[in-house]
Amino acid sequence: MALTPRLDQRQSQSLVMTPQLQQAIKLLQLSNLELAEFVEQELEQNPMLERDEDENRTTAAEDADGAAPDDAGSDEAAPDALGPDAGDLGDGGPDDGMSMDFGDDGDGGPADGDMDVALDDLYTQDGQTDAVQTAADPGYEPVLPTSAAGGYDDDLPGFDQTLSSDITLRDHLMDQLGMDVSDLVDRMIGAYLIDSLDDTGYLTVDLATVAEALDCAPERVEAVLKRLQQFDPPGIFARDLKECMSLQLADRDRLDPAMAAFIDNLDMVARREFKALAKICGVDAEDVADMLSELKSLNPKPALAFDGEVAQPVVPDVLMRARPSGGWHIELNPDTLPRVLVNNQYYAEINAKKASKTDRQYITEQYQSANWLVKSLHQRATTILKVAKEIVRQQDAFFQKGVQHLRPLVLRDIADIIDMHESTVSRVTANKYIASPRGIFELKYFFTSSISRADGGEAFSAEAVKARIRAMIDGEPPTQVLSDDKIVDILRADGVDIARRTVAKYREAMGIPSSVQRRRQKSVSN
């Protein structure tokens, strides 16, 4: 057989990850903060995109009902944005943007609700709760614009802007440094040490490094540090936990030899070896209990009283509330939906003008990119809502009765029902939160492994079993501390087929000490 070159034509199918598809997948797994940052970057780079500044428009449901929906979790009866009988777009039902209702289907369980989506309303909801009043309405009164200062000059600051701000730790320490240290060199060393503190008030730099940087003797730096350690708050400028507690005890005049020995053996305190500590400190069990109580009253992070950052609350992506007629109303949080529009007018004006081929190509690419972004944002919103709705349907018993009724759930269960891939559900539930009447939960919280029943019935959720273990331990009397084996026996008596090592793993994951450690703690407390 002769070897000769030839050309063959074959036809095959393959999945190609285009940049647009990669962007759509990327948007799915972004949190609301990351999404807002991404949209801001696109607004800066793409001239075809513009921010939708019209936040006074209301949805059709608000115009029909006279008010916007209440906040998630409210027990008050409020008109539903999407009524139980308004489901099909072709039937002329009210248009609510991104929301879903599902209620009782006659059998007591949640029935499948219809989804009503309008792209025009998706990025215009502002979450306002007051009815929109027009000049044609009876009793209409025009609202005059007012300034933040309560007068007519918008440039003047408001009253709340004239209030003094909180004193920072650095200002507090610098004030004490100026009053207590007169030598200019010592003040420079003190200022250097103040700037070397971490957020909790500990000194993070070696004194030899400070002496080398300031070209002074290490002994002088040590002397300045001793003076700074007398500043308020007590425990500041410590180099480790032991020194921090010693400084606070010295400030209270409680750093006697017994307490110093107690502080020197913090590892034994953590292990609750109080009998050995009593011998080391030369005191009895009652004195050890008193020293432990005083140790708990100390502040291991003294700087947080000044510069502690306020914990930022989680902004939920999905809002959920009970409907007066039964079931749940689910909607996307309008505050987390980016409001962006494609500037068609600007695109038409550019095309009408004579431009070079390169300019037209650039404008066309940006216009297509802007359209794709808006469609991707819409698809992301509808997908999140669809997944959240099915999660609520599967975990209906949890929202009604509590964590004891949390069902075991995996990504495949949701993916099969909503006809999506597991990876898509995983991306949608990552860093997304839902505000429910029982609190704010990450969507991934509802996906838990299962623990089989001893009688072969419906399996238990791992989170539900953890909650039962915590409840049993919290309710145990001091004289009858439950061991892991005893917990296994109680759970198996209730039908939970669980092993001892699983109980130990759950207990450690919840930060609960062993039965031996709990017995020591309760013996000291009593």
Image (tube, rainbow, N blue to C red):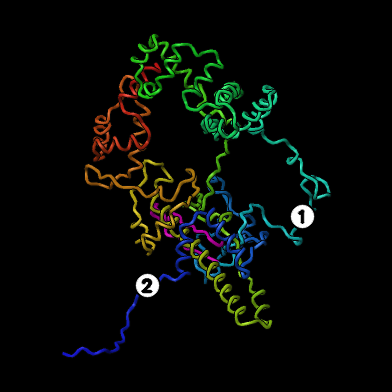
| Along the viewing direction, whichever of 208 and 289 lies nearer the viewer | 208
Quadrant in which residue 363 is drawn: bottom right
Sequence-first disc among 1 and 2? 2
| Along the viewing direction, whichever of 395 and 35 lies nearer the viewer | 35
Q: Position of residue 148 (x, y in %)?
A: 76, 47
Mark 1 secondary-structure assignment: loop
Residue 13 drawn above or below residue 520 = below
At a point 55% along the width and 74% down the height, the residue shown is 368
| Along the viewing direction, whichever of 348 and 282 lies nearer the viewer | 282
Q: Position of residue 444 (x, y in %)?
A: 41, 50
Q: Does the magenta stretch include residue 108?
A: yes
The residue lying furthest to the left in this view is: 1
| Along the viewing direction, whichever of 84 and 514 lies nearer the viewer | 514
Which part of the image, by quadrant, shows the N terminus?
bottom left
Q: Where is residue 13 in the image (x, y as percent from the top left)?
A: 34, 77
Could you tell me if residue 428 is visible in this image? yes
Write the start and end of the magenta stretch as one range: 96-118
Could you tell me if residue 105 is visible in this image? no
* Residue on which disc 2 sits: 15
Q: Which amino acid type is shown beneath numbered disc 1?
A: Gly
> Label 1: few (<14), some or many (≥20) within 10 Å?
few
Mark 2 secondary-structure assignment: loop
Which mark is nearer the camera, 1 or 2?
Answer: 2
Residue 322 drawn above or below residue 168 = below
| Residues at marks 1 and 2, CA–CA distance in whole angstroms | 62 Å
* Residue on which disc 1 sits: 139
Quadrant in which residue 497 is drawn: top left
At a point 31% along the width and 86% down the height, the residue shown is 9
Q: Which amino acid type is shown beneath numbered disc 2?
A: Leu
Quadrant in which residue 479 is drawn: top left
Left or right: residue 495 compared with residue 206? left
Q: Where is residue 404 in the image (x, y as percent from the top left)?
A: 37, 40
